[in-house]
């Protein structure tokens, strides 16, 4: 909730392609899609994994690796586009992804991986995390959305916490 005691509802940005390459161009992909929320109580949950995956998909379309017919609504974007709507963001989902869903090959994407095991690499997520910490408000919240093979032994989550703590202690 906000520091003044008000509750909030937040809409989450979604990736341009789902994990199994079945649903293309879901709602609330780009920062401009959240313009309709300005001035109202509904805020934004920014999912870093979703946006980084969108960026990777778009790069493949623009480079000719993915067929444009699957991606009608693409724009050139970058990892720090969330700064355009930072006043609207109240909650962060933070993780990375590995693999990219490809409709022509039935390749899939795995969300919730730690940056070191991601398709885009540690430096990509380090830059985003540091900018979030630099610009976040006091009442913002972040959740690490990490997948585990064994939830009774949270190895990946421990790795994610250690990763974040190393960045926080170096700043």
Image (cartoon, helix red, strand yellow):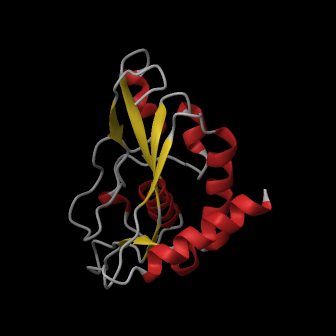
Compared across the picture, whether 48 is left or right of 20 comes to right
Residue 152 can be seen in this image: yes
Q: Nearer the viewer, residue 92 or 3?
A: 3
Q: Indicate the position of residue 88 as horizontal and vertical percent values.
A: 48, 29
Which residue is depicted at the point 78% across and 56% down? 171
Quarter residue 125 falls in: bottom right
Residue 146, image x, y percentages: 40, 69
Outermost residue, right side: 170
Q: Is residue 119 visible?
A: no
* Quarter in which the N terminus is drawn: top left
Pinpoint residue 129: horizontal percent, then vertical percent: 62, 55
- Residue at 79 percent across and 62 percent down: it is 170
Picture residue at 32% right of the left edge, 60% below the top: 17
Q: Give me the residue at 48% from left, 44% from top.
A: 141
Q: Nearer the viewer, residue 7 or 34?
A: 7
**Residue closest to the far left:** 22
> Which quadrant of the figure has residue 50?
bottom left
Residue 99 as seen in the image, left or right of residue 78? left
Q: Is residue 138 left or right of residue 29?
A: right
Q: Is residue 14 above or below residue 136?
A: below
Q: Position of residue 130 (x, y in %)?
A: 68, 53
Tell me if 42 is positioned left or right of 98 in this view. Answer: left
Residue closer to the observer: 162 or 37 = 162
Question: Quadrant of residue 36 in the image?
Answer: top left
Depth check: give the residue in front, 97 or 75.
97
């Amino acid at each position: 909730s906000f520091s003044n005691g008000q509750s909030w509802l937040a809409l989450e940005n979604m990736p341009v392609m789902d994990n199994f390459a079945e649903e293309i161009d879901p709602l609330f992909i780009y920062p401009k899609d959240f313009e309709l929320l300005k001035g109202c109580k509904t805020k934004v949950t920014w999912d870093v994994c979703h946006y980084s995956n969108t960026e990777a998909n778009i790069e493949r379309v623009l480079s000719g690796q993915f067929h444009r017919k699957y991606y009608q609504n693409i724009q050139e974007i970058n990892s720090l586009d969330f700064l355009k709507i930072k006043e609207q963001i109240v909650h962060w989902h933070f993780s990375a992804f590995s693999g990219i869903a490809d409709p022509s090959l039935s390749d899939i994407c795995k969300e919730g991986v730690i940056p070191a095991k991601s398709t885009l690499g540690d430096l990509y997520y380090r830059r985003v995390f540091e900018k979030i910490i630099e610009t976040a408000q006091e009442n913002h919240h972040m959740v690490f959305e990490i997948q585990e093979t064994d939830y009774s032994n949270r190895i990946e989550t421990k790795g994610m916490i250690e990763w974040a703590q190393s960045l926080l202690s170096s700043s």
